[in-house]
């Protein structure tokens, strides 16, 4: 990733190499709390195995590598107020309710 940065690619400075599961959970828990401070919205992080030998050993499924996973944070919860429900009629005549918040 540092080589990619030196070639001019935009690479996050918030990456961390974790050597233990405890370090990994600390990193996940930190970003679960501080993700709102990032300049872009995020709902998770990507965890990858760094060792090429281990990547080769883990291999791939039919579509994705087994050595990289997307960890999703808990969904954010918020309250909102329903202002009104309107209805729209589709081209086939189906009436669908629309919630206006």
Image (cartoon, grey):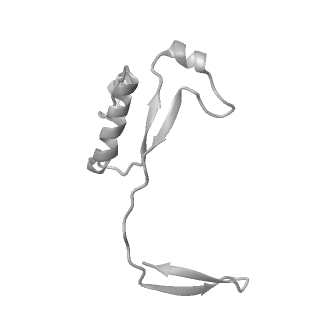
The part of the image, by quadrant, that contains residue 97 is bottom right
Does residue 68 appear to the left or right of 11 in the view shown? right
Does residue 78 appear to the left or right of 51 in the view shown? left
Q: Position of residue 95 (x, y in %)?
A: 65, 85
Question: Is residue 51 depicted above or below 26 in this figure?
Answer: above
Q: Position of residue 68 (x, y in %)?
A: 52, 30
The part of the image, by quadrant, that contains residue 11 is top left
Does residue 93 appear to the left or right of 16 in the view shown? right
The part of the image, by quadrant, that contains residue 1 is top left
Residue situated in front as seen by the camera: 64 or 18: 18
Q: Position of residue 21 (x, y in %)?
A: 40, 25
Q: Position of residue 55 (x, y in %)?
A: 54, 19
Question: Is residue 47 depicted above or below 50 in this figure?
Answer: below
- Residue for point 50% across, 85% down: 85
Observer able to see residue 11: no
Observer able to see residue 81: yes
Which residue reaches farthest right? 92
């Amino acid at each position: 990733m540092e080589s990619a940065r030196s070639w001019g690619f935009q690479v996050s400075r918030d990456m961390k190499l974790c050597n233990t599961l405890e370090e990994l959970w600390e990193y996940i828990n930190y970003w679960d709390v501080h993700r709102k401070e990032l300049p872009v919205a995020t709902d998770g992080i990507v965890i990858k195995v760094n060792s090429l030998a281990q990547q080769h050993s883990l291999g791939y499924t039919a579509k994705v590598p087994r050595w990289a996973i997307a960890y999703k944070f808990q969904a954010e919860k918020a309250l909102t107020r329903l202002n009104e429900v309107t209805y729209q009629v589709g081209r086939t005549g189906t009436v669908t309710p629309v919630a206006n918040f």
